[in-house]
Image (tube, rainbow, N blue to C red):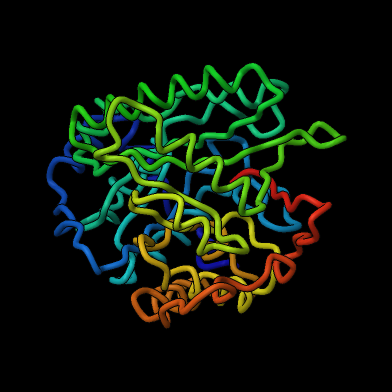
Amino acid sequence: MSLNDDPRRYEHLSRIRLEDPEAVARAAATRRRHPGLKHGVQNFIVAADHPARGALSVGPEPMAMADRRDLLDRLQIALANPAVDGILASPDIMDDLLLLGALDGKLIFGSMNRGGLAGLVNEFDDRFTGHTAAALQALGADGGKMLTRICLGDPDTVATLEATAKAIDSLAERKLIAMVEPFLSVRDAHGKVRNDLRADAVIKSVGIAEGLGSTSAYTWMKLPVVADMERVMASTTLPTVLLGGDPDGSQDEVFASWQAALALPGVRGLTVGRTLLYPHDGDVAGAVATAASLLNSAEPATGPGTGPAPAAAAGEHTSSDRIPVKVSE
């Protein structure tokens, strides 16, 4: 996709950062806030925190997210749709969007732990290197998100869990939402970290994650759409948003699985990034509009087996002796 070939189209951001760095704080202080969350209204949040963890790939393209100008083009197209309620971003992207005036009236969620770099030898030591709760409060943000990968065979997991619990408490003290994204994760034979997407594994990760911190009053779950999603949603009373991840199946299959999951009790909306920002056909506006049309429009689930499309539709295994896995975020 080439929306604008002018290499200088964002040069003014560099100039502002050089000459007037306080402009970021002013933009945050003067922006119009989101009108607020309401029960029965599902929210649509675009995620853009992947590069800060060294995760630049989308599908077969290993450097898809590397061009910041292209990424900002795509984000502004997505955020221009009035059905998009907000952004989840790392500090650098958040600051660019604030300077561009693209977050007026939007929900803001900061990405807090980006230390578990993709491919890092100690990837499970996912330290909090991004937004702090204090910084999010100063920005007028609505909350912070934390990736919480749980590997039973890696001793770094306990440190990540402890840091996550402290971050939840720090956000709750400020009445800010903690959006927790848990996975049971493993290293495959090649040393690559993958997430176990069997329903039982997701349910176990939810049980662990929702018990972190001294209060869950401000905690949300951010969960993948998997087979038996009804069972997953039965495992929590916390508000839950669905993540998109790096899409495996066709766009129609992905949207069908989201629509079914959005009909389940407790699902508060979508928090997705690459699937919509880098669609197969390059039509960002169209992908965002289609996703927006799924919110509050899905038929309610009526019983067992009426969940999202089977995992096999997204290239995952479903037989009992094989574990469906997917690369983090």
Could you tell me which residue is drawn at 33 percent across and 33 percent down? 17
Could you tell me which residue is drawn at 40 percent across and 33 percent down? 211
Q: For the N terminus, which image quadrant?
A: bottom right
Left/right placement of residue 136 relative to residue 254 reads left
Q: Is residue 81 above or below residue 121?
A: below
Could you tell me which residue is drawn at 40 percent across and 29 percent down? 212
Q: Quadrant of residue 112?
A: top left
Name the residue at the right extreme: 189
Could you tell me which residue is drawn at 47 percent across and 49 percent down? 48
Report if residue 183 is visible in the image: yes
Left/right placement of residue 264 relative to residue 103 reads right
- Nearer-the-camera pick, 320 or 125: 320
Q: Quadrant of residue 188?
A: top right
- Nearer-the-camera pick, 24 or 179: 179
Q: Is residue 252 above or below residue 126?
A: below
Q: Position of residue 278 (x, y in %)?
A: 58, 63
**Number of callouts:** 0
Q: Is residue 290 above or below residue 92?
A: below
Report if residue 7 is visible in the image: no
- Nearer-the-camera pick, 76 or 41: 41
Q: Position of residue 296 (x, y in %)?
A: 34, 76
Q: Position of residue 117 (x, y in %)?
A: 62, 30
Q: Position of residue 45 (x, y in %)?
A: 37, 58
Left/right placement of residue 56 relative to residue 50 reads right
